[in-house]
Image (spheres, rainbow, N blue to C red):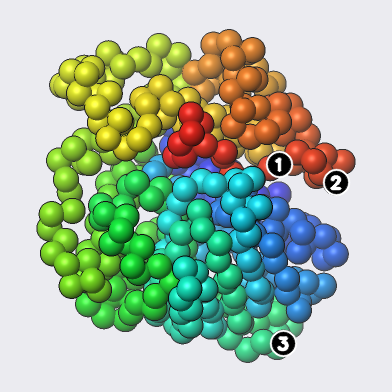
Amino acid sequence: MPLVPFCGVSRGEILLLPSVLRLDGVPVRERFDFWWEAVARSVVSVDVSSDQAADFWAEMHMLDLGVAQLSRVRCVSFDARRSPSRIRRSDPGHYQLSLTLRGRSGIQQVGREAGLAPTDITLYDTSRTFHAWTVAEDPGSRTADGSRPSVSDGLILQFPRDLLPLPASAAERLLAVRLSGRDGIGGLLSGYLHQLIAQLDSRSPSEALRLSTVALDLVAALLAHELDTDASGFLSDPNGVLLMRVQAFIERELGEADLSPSTIAAAHHISVRHLHRLFQSEGVTLGGWIRLRRLERCRRDLADPLMDDLPVRAIASRWGFSSDAHFSRAFRAAYGASPAAYRRHLREPRLMAGVSAESAVPVDGHSA
């Protein structure tokens, strides 16, 4: 199969597994559309053109870090635009940090433009329109064995804006700005992301949390350095660290139907009131966060062809939904289709073209 799923279960413990998106099993004439539909579900939805659409080749390795996702993308040249209509249809509320490894790329956002060469880094906001492009290392040529066209290569770290330990006003000043990933803090960040993507192993939610915490602290340190700002006040805030620990615990216990504020609070030796305040400070409710994460796990299972034999009801129960009707209503509100229709759409997209298969629409007015 061209798509290997994100998550799995081993010995009763939820593991966050790497996934790989390849086009080897997809007919050549369908590869361009297939690829960008998959990108819309796993990264961000964009309008795309490419001079090589008829001879399209791309590959993506994805590493789920619980609250963040790291992807390595190899692809022929393309031009992508995120429009207001795309944002209205699906706004996950993420920042994306791009590290160019091979070829050339660029981004336009908030009136700025950054041209990027290998080792360059840039940050952009998926809730704002942007124009991005990538040019392969040797456009129009093919590999020595002729098996595929020449491609670009890069890493993308995506994470919720609220999890970056820097004020939004500070991060906004560096959207679509070229940053060096060759040395200094940028070099540390680049090296760390390289190590993460090179070690595509399954990880527990608690391990993934620690790795994502380090990555986000390095991102914040790089941005603060570029702004000539002291980052120490933003990194490893005690409440922020506690919140991420709580979120990791929730991720690990999502399949438990009796997951409740009292059990979560007790596991972290805090009061229920303090627990609710942690989430309120991020503009989301505890119940809304749990529901969103459960829905996302269900969505991934429904998208996984290896789980086609598992009924929708069993998937819902697996991730803590005790009521079929409640699950169906919540899923439709989040993704614009019933669970069964969503699954059919992914298998026969041309027959269900009106059903959105993009990333989660915010629940309770908030995104993950």
**Left or right: 2 with respect to 320?**
right
Up the image or down, 320 lies above or below 31; here it is: above
Dots 1 and 3: beta carbons under 8 Å? no
Q: Earlier in the sequence, mark 2 or mark 3?
A: 3
Query: Which residue in the structure is indicated by mark 1?
Result: 356
Q: Which mark is residue 140?
A: 3
Q: Residues within 10 Å of mark 3 (few under 14, many from 20)?
A: few
Which of discs 2 and 1 lies nearer the camera? The answer is 1
Q: Amino acid at mark 2?
A: Arg
Q: Amino acid at mark 3?
A: Gly
Residue at (30, 31) in percent of width and height: 279
Q: Residues within 10 Å of mark 1 (few under 14, many from 20)?
A: some
The percent coordinates of residue 17 (x first, y second) are: 48, 44
Q: Earlier in the sequence, mark 2 or mark 1?
A: 2
Residue at (51, 64) in percent of width and height: 72
The percent coordinates of residue 312 (x first, y second) are: 67, 22
In front here: 52 or 355? 355
